[in-house]
Amino acid sequence: MATTQGGEVKFSILVMISVMALISSVHASLHEYNEAKFVNKGNAFVFHGGSEGLYASIPTYNHSSTTSGISFIRFEKITFQRSKEAKGMGLVQAIIFEVEDRESIGGSAYGGQRAVCCTPDLAKLGVCNQGEIIHRPSTKNPDWPQVFGVSFNIDETTAILPTKTITISASGMYNLYFIHCDSNLNGLTIDGKTIWKNPTGYLPGRMAPLMQFYGFMSLAFVLLGIFWFSQYARFWKEILQLQNCITLVIALGMFEMALWYFDYAEFNDTGIRPIGITIWAVIFGTVKRTVARLIILLVAMGYGVVRPTLGGLTSKVVMLGGTFLLASGVLELVENVGTINDLSGHTRFFLVLPVAMLDAFFIVWVFKSLSTTLNKLQARRMTAKLDIYRKFTNALAVTVIVSVGWVCYELYFKSSDIYNERWQNAWIIPAFWQVLSFSLLSVICALWAPSQNPTRYAYSDESNEEFDKEDTLTLIKPSSTALSKET
């Protein structure tokens, strides 16, 4: 049995390492293009160059650098390559627009199909130049959208876009597209990079507030650690196995929060995400969440408190923990290490689904076990333990209710914000889950804090409890015999 459980954990770790090896180095505020191809959309050929939330420039922010306080998008070494068979002076344009101005891009003649490239009919009306992007000035800023481009020389296969810096004067979700309207340029590729910068650094707009948030969370874990470790040092001779597990979760949380803070700080300073720190933050966070869920499950089962062992349930607990470790680890790696733009991909849904299902299974198992534990504590009139378990059940119930409510809000937030117009508030979504898990951990620390009298919630042979003799029974449909015993 031990060999099988160890194999499951090793397999989970090996898969996570494989995913890390497959993820290439990504520079989130440094958008690099390596022989990327254009996609045909309508009457245009389009390549998405990036989307990020950018705050307005603050020129007086810091005089120590010419770029401090300035928000910009810079184009560097943008090169277009066409086939040798292509002829003519094909035009390739770049367009940058704020998401609120999306309706100012494209148009149609006489109410026909909407087009991105100027058609002969629209050119006759004098609203645009044939072969160029259709755009109208923004109602807020007539200088936007920003459109510029480069044409190929007749006999050349390469065109280089001049280095250019676009200063951002208004906060918004900015989108960059490279577009050409010439079918003779079919197969065109793009190389080079664009650099996106906010006034306070290179962090994308939705991520910028998280650096300060993780700083506060690091401080919160330090304060919780001071309380817990001081109690642990005072009563180290009376420590229970459960309290050792809680100590591990606190330590993992301290490392995770610190790593996330340094990850964001380094990214903000250099514009290049430190992949090593990010991966370690993901690993510590994933292990912390897995251990925390297992602790809650073990407490609900009464392990170390009203039963000395898990009996036949050990393998099932380890299997569930290993599966969650794998699913959660892959999700976090792809979501954090593979992020370039301020947009969520459809792939995330398929990675979130197994994690959500495993969480739901955890919740069902936890509350079923709590119900059994509470009934038996009440039947045996173990009032001290019963009081602790009731408080724990109430805290867990509140957490689940709040979680369900927040999931509903998150679904509403994302479904009603298709174009990421509320990007400045998006950081609250991941921050809330960190605060909620920290709050539940604090409650557990208060209920099971080390003390000089651990027998009030420790397992005792004298109580003659028979928790270790119960299932292995199915979690879905208990037998009538088991139900009669619990009653």
Image (cartoon, rainbow, N blue to C red):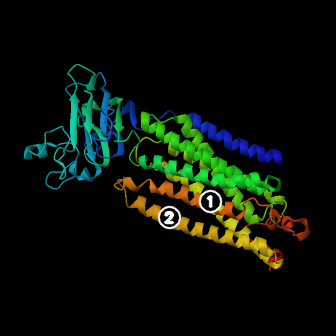
Q: Residue at x 28, y 22 (%)?
A: 157
State whether residue 159 is above or below residue 431. above
**Which label sits on residue 359?**
1
Q: List x then y, in percent, for residue 28.
A: 43, 38
Q: Quadrant of residue 10?
A: top right
Element assignment for label 2: helix
Type of the residue with mark 2? Trp
Q: Which residue is mark 2?
A: 406
Q: CA distance from mark 2 to mark 1?
A: 15 Å
Mark 1 Cα-neighbour bin, 10 Å: few <14, some 14–19, many ≥20: some
| 58, 360: nearer the viewer | 58
Element assignment for label 1: helix
Q: List x then y, in percent, for residue 387.
A: 73, 73
Q: Nearer the viewer, mark 2 or mark 1?
A: 2
- Residue 167 visible to the viewer: yes
Marks 2 and 1, the one that precedes in the sequence: 1
| 195, 175: nearer the viewer | 195
- Residue 337 visible to the viewer: no
